[in-house]
Amino acid sequence: MKKIGKFLSSMPFAIILLVLLAAACALSSTVSQGQTYEYYAAQYGERMAGLILALRLDDAFHSWWFIGLSTVLCINLFCCNLIRLPALMKRAEAFAKPDGMTTGITAEAAGDGDPHRLFAALHMPKAKEDGDGRIFAAGNKAGFWGAWICHLGILLLILGFALGQMTMKQYTVYALPGQTKEMGDSGLSVTVEDLRISRDENGAILQYTAMLTVSDSVKNTVESGRAAVNAPANLYGYKFFQNSIGWGADVRVLKNGEELQKEQLCVGEFFAVADKPELVICFPAFYPDYSAEIKTNDPAAEVKDPAYIYQVYYQGQILGMNALKAGEELTIDEYTVLFERPRNYTLLAVKRDSFTWLVLLGGLITLAGLVLAFWLQPSAVCAVREGSGWHVYGRCRKGGVLFRDEFLKAAAEAGFTPCENRTTAGGDT
Amino acid sequence: MIQTENTLFTIAVIGYFILTALNFAFVILKKEPLAKAAFRLQAGIFILHTAALVLRGIGTGHWPMTNQYEFSTSFAWALCLVSLIFIRKYRFPVLGAFSSPLILLMIGYAAMQNREVRELMPSLRSSWLAFHVSTAIIAYGAFGVTCVISLIFLFRGRMKEEGFWGQHIPDTEKLDMISYRSACLGMLFLTLTILTGAIWAEQAWGSYWSWDPKETWSLVTWIIYAVYLHLRIRRGWKGKGAAWFAVIGFVCVIFTYIGVNTFLPGVHSYA
Ligand code: HEM
């Protein structure tokens, strides 16, 4: 039992988990996410489609096995960090004392050289003499903590990500300038006061800016702000991101020549005629320049020869579908339908994630841990009297070969001769 | 400005070609002065290449790493920079012989790309993006050098201690340490790349992580190098096993950079 526990919190197990996780990510990235059975069947055949759905590869990153694997990795990492903490503290402490230099000597030299020159050459100006006539210095001690801090950062990051996923509120709101839309179940409504598109002298788009007013009908309060690309608005604790734009227009319905109804419609929306709800008008597409050779529905294109594509449904059955040019009208019995004033709507992504800060903090701690682990190689140097001269020892926790070269070079310059590792600097042995 | 950049770029391509030839000559003829000349030539081309990138930045009015051409020429530039540093720091001229073909491949890939200057869409006008791609090219450059050193490591195992290779290639212990150093540099910068990319995505789209294939593959790459770092600490796997992982890691880097855009769909399709 104890053995199993030890393995589950061990590094070999961590390596297996990391390889599995990388393989899972790689595999999942090859399958288009969030599609239907029909899509996969058309793409890969029916048997594969069944397998994809059974294994939840259609939403792999939220599947039980992916979350399970990540959880096991976190538990493994947490236990490993916790179990190693006391030993790490002990080792770091011992490393910073001359008595700790009883094992793992990386290089040594002896002779009549000047130990202070050696310490200076190794950038260890704080070398101190102790009561026993030894001179000792330890550098880059913080390097001991690098991996530990890095692991802690990863745990915080994953924790922040998971909490965010569980508690995050997300909405999508799209509206034409002047329109007000409810924001899902948030109790807030969003009015797009204006949508500005700035261009440079060549017509290339520099920025989209939506001027927003958000109101809380219960508290009777409003907050206003602007959401631009790369500069979201922060209103009622939600972030409003200017995500994209699309086409919309006004649609008027006349009955026997009298205006019955006026709607502001974005492409993709529909409405029922006010006094005949079984009659439904859809607005599936808009072309800003229908006479162009290549017809595009690019939302940033200039409106030259607009064409509104419409569909009419009666009691759920399609009655007709066609394009209306500017000024053209659609007549259905006593009703006349007119499409006018084509303009852009804005699509806003709205989000409240109270744990983004934790993810960022985790990321920064991970980074700090990596800097410590990679940059600061803990090393210690001790000089002990030997006859009329000194015996100098160097010890480096990692990267021994490079440190040995550096140490022996500095030792030679300080007047020492390299010798085979034979003794320890710490005690009487 | 762009005209001059084009000329400098062409000179750099020819320069990298000559560099590769010179390095081959060094390895075949085994003459020390050729290695010295190759190092000086590489430093010279590096300066020209830097000038080309600066002119591209001024000419286009944006950070010169925002489309496939700009990113691949920057990638070659970073490979050149990191290998220069490692050749000099560890007195390791044979590294140049192995890294110059890789730089040549990358700059050749850049030369095949469309060099037209295009306006940036608003979401790409961000300083976080500039950080994101700059850290990415340094990470990629460092991983390229790690891969090359790991290949030399695997090749070194079959070489005799005496003779030209024995003299010019550090022993396996040292090679392992040098490749570890460049992997550390890469890992640090890849972490920065992922962090700055997440900050940018959060600002631009309101989602710092959306499992887009490019994001997913950068995570795969990051995990592979984490495995490499842990394997190096394990006794049984130290050396060859870790070296193979460093090579696999670079295959992931290349796949993340080129393969994802070609084979998998996602929001990074402009880069
Ligand atoms: C994605 C996950 C991980 C990352 C990025 C990571 C990163 C690192 C880094 C950078 C080091 C330092 C390596 C060096 O100095 O050369 C390290 C060491 C280490 N890691 Fe991890 N690690 C991860 C997961 C784990 C897990 C799950 C365990 C669980 C057992 C673990 C156990 C260790 C151990 C025991 C060391 C040696 C520590 C030392 O030398 O003081 N790591 N890790």
Image (spheres, coloured by chain):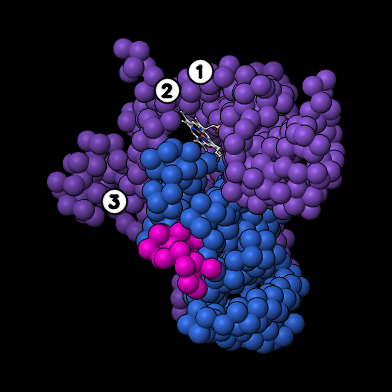
Chain colours: A purple, B blue
Inspect this view and state whether residue A228 appears: no
The residue lying at 75 percent from left, 52 percent from top is: A412
Give the residue type at disc 1: Ile
- Asked whether A86 or A161 is in front, the reply is A86
SS for dot 2 = loop
Q: Which mark is residue A318?
A: 3
Inspect this view and state whether residue B194 appears: yes
Q: Is residue B156 magenta?
A: yes
| Mark 2 Cα-neighbour bin, 10 Å: few <14, some 14–19, many ≥20 | many
- Asked whether A341 or A354 is in front, the reply is A354
Q: Are marks 3 and 1 on the same chain?
A: yes
Q: Give the residue pinned by disc 1.
A: A83
**Residue A321 % position (x, y):** 34, 59
SS for dot 3 = strand
The residue lying at 77 percent from left, 34 percent from top is: A387
In the rendered image, which quarter is residue B255 located in? bottom left
Q: Which mark is residue A9?
A: 2
SS for dot 1 = helix
Q: Which mark is residue A243?
A: none
Q: Is residue A68 above or below residue A42?
A: above
Instruction: Examine the residues drawn in magenta and state their main secondary structure.
Output: helix
Give the residue type at disc 3: Ile
Q: Are marks 1 and 2 in contact (CB under 8 Å)?
A: yes
- Circle 1 chain: A
In the displayed structure image, the side of residue A7 where residue A409 appears, left or right: right
**Residue A106 % position (x, y):** 61, 40
> Where are the magenta residues, as a range?
B148-167
Give the residue type at disc 2: Ser
Q: Is residue B125 above or below residue B211?
A: below
Whether ligand 1 has any atom under 8 Å from the Cβ at mark 3 is answered as: no
Q: Earlier in the sequence, mark 3 or mark 2?
A: 2
Q: Is residue B167 above or below residue A167?
A: below
